[in-house]
Image: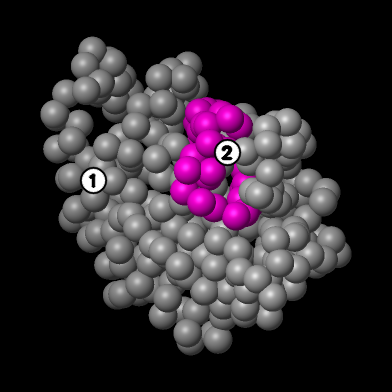
């Protein structure tokens, strides 16, 4: 029996226009060629590409790989990060047919099982898009997510997996090229989908490497989303913040004037500080997380303070 080093949570440009209704339509600008070249440079054996609510890109990625000899050892496996009817996310590994988002968790899990796939709760205790206690219904728990820079969310996920005797894995949740492979797992199996899924289901998988997304990488992702979603953001502000539309529109204009200003680094640091306070209140002190579902900035700020 062999071992394969795998990336379990990553995205590419085919994720665009498939994200949830409360997210910008542009999600990721990583191309197929970039993704494979990066995986090759890192010595990865397998990629589970988990684009949002779609299997688009899998056949194109596989074709590109097969047309380039240097990538022949890298296996590309089908996966999907599905948005439930509550806005939470669940990952399906080893499926062959796309699962529609917007269904409840039990419906999605039934469809994953019907396809002999396995389920994973990604970032289960993050502030948004999290299954939280319902993560216990999944086969795997993502106990380390690179984008959970508040740290507390990952600690709670680890604690939860131990409490419920669940298999813990790590995910890069890569949306920018440099974070691909930031988190890797070693699966005790041959490098084929059936063997990998069987091994994952029977706990023959170990976290190999973890690491958090850096400030510049997070800002790079935000910049991409903003630059390509200006019309969406303008409409979102009009619909959700009518009383403070002038202020938020002004901030967006200021941002567009100089997107590389050091001011945005300070804003990021402040946001992380506030996010840690909110995460502590929810994940340690038991505050109600449902207040964050509408993604209202005023509500989040009040909770942080």
Instruction: Describe the element under mark 1 as helix, strand or loop.
Output: helix
For label 1, the residue is: 271
Q: CA distance from mark 1 to mark 2?
A: 33 Å
Q: Residue furthest right?
A: 114
Which residue is at a point 25% across and 21% down the rendered structure image? 259
Residue 163 coordinates in the image, percent (x, y): 48, 86
Instruction: Describe the element under mark 2 as helix, strand or loop.
Output: helix
Disc 1 crowd rating (10 Å Cα; few below 14, some 14-19, many 20+) is some
In the rendered view, tell whether residue 237 sits above or below residue 35: above
Q: Quadrant of residue 286?
A: bottom left
Q: Quadrant of residue 149?
A: bottom left
Foreground residue among 79 and 130:
79
**The N terminus: image quadrant:** bottom right
Whether residue 206 sits left or right of residue 255 in the image: it is right
Residue 83 coordinates in the image, percent (x, y): 63, 50
Which residue is at a point 79% across and 65% down the rendered structure image? 194
Tell me the colour scheme of the image.
Answer: one colour
Whether residue 115 sits left or right of residue 289 in the image: it is right
Which residue is at a point 35% across and 72% down the rendered structure image? 155
Foreground residue among 44 and 83:
44
- Of discs 1 and 2, which sits in the foreground? 2
Residue 37 coordinates in the image, percent (x, y): 53, 36
Asked whether residue 74 is in view, the answer is: yes
Was residue 31 drawn as part of the magenta stretch in this picture? yes
Residue 235 coordinates in the image, percent (x, y): 47, 21
Foreground residue among 268 and 245:
268
**The C terminus: image quadrant:** bottom left
Question: Bounds of the magenta span?
Answer: 23-52
For label 2, the residue is: 36
In the rendered view, tell whether residue 76 sits above or below residue 63: below
Q: How many marks?
A: 2
């Amino acid at each position: 029996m062999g071992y394969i080093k795998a990336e379990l949570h990553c995205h590419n440009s085919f994720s665009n226009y498939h994200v949830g209704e409360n997210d910008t339509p542009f999600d990721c600008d990583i191309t197929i060629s970039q993704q494979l070249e990066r995986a090759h440079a890192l010595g990865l054996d397998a990629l589970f590409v988990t684009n949002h609510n779609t299997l688009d890109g899998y056949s194109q990625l596989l074709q590109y790989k097969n047309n380039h000899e240097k990538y022949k050892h890298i296996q590309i496996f089908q996966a999907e990060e599905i948005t439930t009817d509550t806005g939470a996310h669940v990952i399906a590994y080893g499926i062959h047919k796309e699962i529609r988002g917007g269904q409840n968790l039990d419906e999605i899990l039934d469809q994953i099982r019907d396809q002999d796939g396995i389920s994973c709760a990604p970032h289960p205790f993050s502030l948004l898009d999290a299954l939280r206690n319902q993560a216990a219904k999944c086969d795997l728990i993502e106990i380390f997510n690179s984008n959970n820079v508040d740290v507390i969310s990952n600690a709670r996920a680890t604690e939860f997996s131990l409490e419920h005797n669940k298999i813990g894995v790590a995910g890069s949740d890569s949306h920018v090229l440099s974070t691909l492979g930031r988190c890797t797992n070693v699966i005790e199996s041959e490098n084929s989908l059936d063997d990998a899924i069987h091994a994952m289901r029977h706990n023959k998988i170990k976290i190999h490497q973890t690491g958090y997304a850096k400030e510049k990488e997070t800002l790079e992702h935000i910049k991409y989303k903003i630059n390509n979603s200006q019309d969406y953001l303008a409409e979102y502000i009009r619909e959700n913040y009518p009383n403070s539309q002038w202020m938020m529109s002004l901030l967006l204009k200021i941002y567009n004037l100089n997107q590389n200003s050091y001011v945005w680094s300070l804003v990021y640091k402040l946001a992380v500080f506030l996010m840690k306070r909110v995460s502590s209140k929810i994940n340690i002190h038991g505050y109600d997380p449902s207040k964050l579902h509408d993604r209202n900035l005023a509500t989040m700020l009040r909770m942080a303070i």
